[in-house]
Image: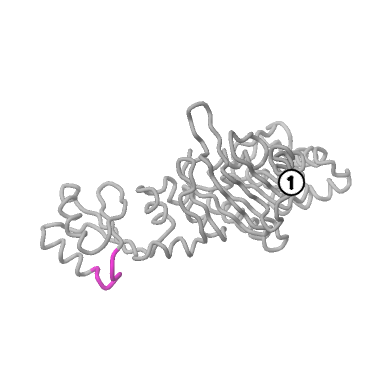
Amino acid sequence: MPSRAQALIRKIDMKSVVEANGLRRTFGDLVAVDGIDLSVSEGEVFGFLGPNGAGKSTAVRMLTTLLRPTDGQAFVGGYNVVSQASEVRKVIGVALQDAAIDPLMTGRELLKLQAVLHGIPRQSARDRGEELLERVGLSAAADRRVGTYSGGMRRRLDLALSLIHEPKILFLDEPTTGLDPTSRTALWEEVRRLNTEFGTTVFLTTQYLEEADELAGRIAIIDYGKIVREGSPADLKASIGAPTLRIDIDPQNLDKAQSVLSEFGIDRPARDGRVAIGLDGGVAKVAEVVSALEKQGVEVLHLELDAPSLDDVFAEATGRRLEGAETPDE
């Protein structure tokens, strides 16, 4: 029978290239990641969705060997992230949200340095660097100091640096935070290309609902360090059932409106000045709802009926809307 140590360094089934069991990380009394279980299949784009402070980045740092777990274990590429960290680093690419980059170096210089760190021969490193600069749209800025790059250019450079050694598994931590719509769309397209053309497994953390919905084949929603829902975007949204009816009203009429709406469906979280329900019967019931509210003296200022969304999934699981549910500032 294998010893515990042997069990910890075993290679896991390669069909699952990222595996976490009871993964936990504390900082003093703060529990950042609270015993999560994860399994990501080879060739998958996996979305790790949650608000700021939910534990996404801490989990990624553990999975990429940058932070030691307090408890539990994880395997990436078949290797234990603690006892076989050097082997893990050979098969992964990592683009972190707060990556430290020397602002005095140029994009081309940084790619060459990254290649050296990975032991890539000089000519191969030069060719690979030029290819990546072109792919991420930075060829024209390759000899500029990185300190002069915009936020979008920095994120594209982060992606290029993470790909220099052609990793099988790519971790992207909040890759589009702060990007304009054009830069965001371009990065999405590159992620899709990496996955479809090269078979790269992508582990993507994000707080943006649209991003998770657009890119991920499967999503885990994390909140306060715990995974609260997991599944494909379609299945998660289908689990909500009825479409969401949102109605803006005078806040003074809130209690009266909620009483009326309770006859038409289950209450759902909503921002101030708005009520929301899962509307049984869908669009056919909207006129009846408005009539019932008017009979009680509740004026409808605005209403909208939406098919179930990932925000509805998050709200159903946590009792509140997802911070960052809207797309980034445009």
Type of the residue with mark 1: Met
- Where residue 223 appears, as percent x and y from the top left, is 45, 44
Tag 1: Cα neighbours inside 10 Å, few (<14), some, or many (≥20)?
A: few
Residue 13 seen in the figure? yes
Q: Which residues are magenta?
A: 279-286
**Image quadrant of residue 313?**
bottom left
Q: Nearer the viewer, residue 134 or 81?
A: 81
Q: Can you identify the residue that label 1 sits on?
A: 1
- Where residue 246 appears, as percent x and y from the top left, is 29, 58
Task: Check residue 278 for magenta coloring.
Answer: no
Residue at coordinates 17% horizontally, 56% vertically from top-left?
A: 259
Residue at coordinates 62% horizontally, 54% vertically from top-left?
A: 40
Answer left or right for 104 relative to 183. right
**Image quadrant of residue 237?**
bottom left
Residue 140 seen in the figure? no
Answer left or right for 97 relative to 299. right
Relative vertical location of residue 197 with respect to residue 35 in this rendering, above or below: below
Answer left or right for 56 relative to 297. right
Q: Nearer the viewer, residue 76 or 274?
A: 76
